Image (spheres, grey):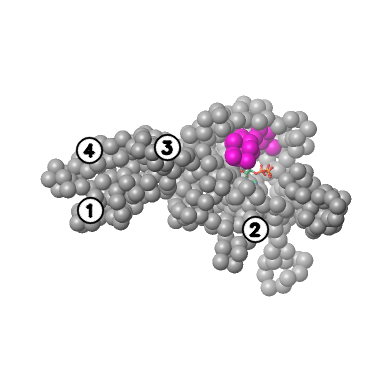
Amino acid sequence: MDDVVSLCARRGFIWQSSEIYGGINGFWDYGPLGVELKNNLKALWWRRVVREREDVEGLDSSIIAHPRTWEASGHVEHFSDPLVDCRACKKRMRADQLDDAGPCPARQGSSEHDWTPARHFNLMLKTFVGAQEDQAATAFLRAETCQSIFLDFKRVRESARQRIPFGIAQIGKAFRNEINPRNFTFRSREFEQGELEFFVHPGERERWFAHWLEQRLAFHRELGFGDDVLRVRPHRPDELAHYAKAAADLEFLFPFGWQEIEGVHDRGEWDLARHSEFSGKDLSVTDEETKERYRPMVIETSVGIDRTCLALLCNGYAEEALEDGETRIVLRLPPALAPVQAAVLPLSKKLAEPARALAATLRRRLAVFYDEAGNIGRRYRRQDEVGTPFCVTYDFDSEADGKVTVRERDSMAQERVPVEGLLSHLRDRLEGGL
Ligand code: ATP
């Protein structure tokens, strides 16, 4: 894990927010390479969940919703973790994670902490809307992106002329005042989710739950997660929310253990029923054929974008012994998600002009990095470390034969490819990889 964290900061993927002030716990900045990786992941999710389906519509709702939203959803009352403090060293922990607290540095003759009884701590972050900082103006930063999907259910269904079964999806920021943010970006206070709420007839909920669980599993397999690092963990009946009929976590094997990266939930009619009750608006639908009036049930898939980025980085990271006795760090990201898809490297600075021209052509369709500094081996290593699937080397023969050398990241195999047709060659290989 330390190696991944260090690579992320060194090469500009992710580092602590507000670093020059000593950082702020639970908040992270994605640098030049990190933002590309994250955007590519979000785009793939959007393609698979929204674009490629007739029965899913997209949404981008505001982060702050009417405060009644969070009363209806149950978050004001129930969205809390049990919190304890050590009376001696003042350490604050989640009561269900005390194994991670370590010894108490402040007690005489004992390394045990002196915990207070647990009390509830609401995880929603508050803010004030408008000029008056009083009760009436208090609002919450959303703790999950899905609630606005329920608020907008009727509007989306009518404007997009959808019929049950159909879904609404969105990607966006969510905020939770986590008691112990930890494990790098895994548990943050500000993070992104990709959520789908799929509305179905009550008689079809099992079928759609199974469908979406399978779809989401296939998505993570597409990211390169094999059975050795990816598993489904169905919730036990006593873990289920009182309104839920079924739920499963998709878990990834991080260096710190198996942890949830996505949840698939059958939420029943809870959300639409509650928002109907609190808003006074009828959120049921009529089946045009049978004239049956009913409230749809909801199957939800909720993936952490940051957790999935972290899983990609952990899964891709490798240190490899080479034949010449050297070691290389290589980040085996799925080619289509790599922040840099092709690096253009002139063998000598004297070849900068044609090499730059080639980079400019490729840049129209690919994420391209141009580098002419240092020896070629070092330049390859730098690209391996950030997961660049292809290095394109422009050498002294290129002028004469119109070809360049394309080196592939994982196998390090090299082949001569004509400059004409290089773009489609690279694009075919990139798409073939995902
Ligand atoms: P956990 O039990 O780990 O706190 P959760 O069960 O509360 O997670 P959900 O409410 O189901 O999580 O949220 C859906 C997804 O959002 C999670 O699978 C995870 O990927 C992501 N997520 C939730 N909390 C955080 C967080 N603090 N930091 C980063 N991602 C998060």
Answer whether residue 320 is visible to the viewer in this image. Answer: yes
Helix, strand or loop at mark 3? strand
Q: Are marks 2 and 4 in contact (CB under 8 Å)?
A: no
Residue 52 coordinates in the image, percent (x, y): 46, 37
Which residues make up the magenta segment? Answer: 247-267
Q: Amino acid at mark 4?
A: Arg
Task: Name the residue tied to disc 4.
Answer: 416
* Nearest-to-viewer mark from 2 and 3: 3
Q: Amino acid at mark 2?
A: Asn
Q: What distance separates the C-alpha of mark 1 from that of mark 3? A: 27 Å
Identify the residue at image location x=51%, y=54%: 9
Q: Which mark is residue 164?
A: none
Q: What distance separates the C-alpha of mark 2 from that of mark 4? A: 49 Å
Task: Name the residue tied to disc 1.
Answer: 348
Q: Amino acid at mark 3?
A: Ala
Helix, strand or loop at mark 1? loop
Q: Which mark is residue 321?
A: 3
How many residues crowd mark 1 within 10 Å: few (<14), some (14–19), many (20+)?
Answer: some
Identify the residue at image location x=59%, y=40%: 255
How many residues crowd mark 4 within 10 Å: few (<14), some (14–19), many (20+)?
Answer: some
Helix, strand or loop at mark 2? loop
Q: What distance separates the C-alpha of mark 1 from that of mark 4? A: 18 Å
Q: Main secondary structure of the magenta part?
A: strand
* Nearest-to-viewer mark from 1 and 2: 1
Answer whether residue 218 is visible to the viewer in this image. Answer: no
Residue 192 coordinates in the image, percent (x, y): 58, 50
Quadrant that contains the C terminus: top left
Q: What distance separates the C-alpha of mark 2 from that of mark 3? A: 36 Å
Where ligand 1 lies, by quadrant?
A: top right
Task: Name the residue tied to disc 2.
Answer: 25
> Residue 285, relative to residue 155: is it above or below?
above
Helix, strand or loop at mark 4? strand
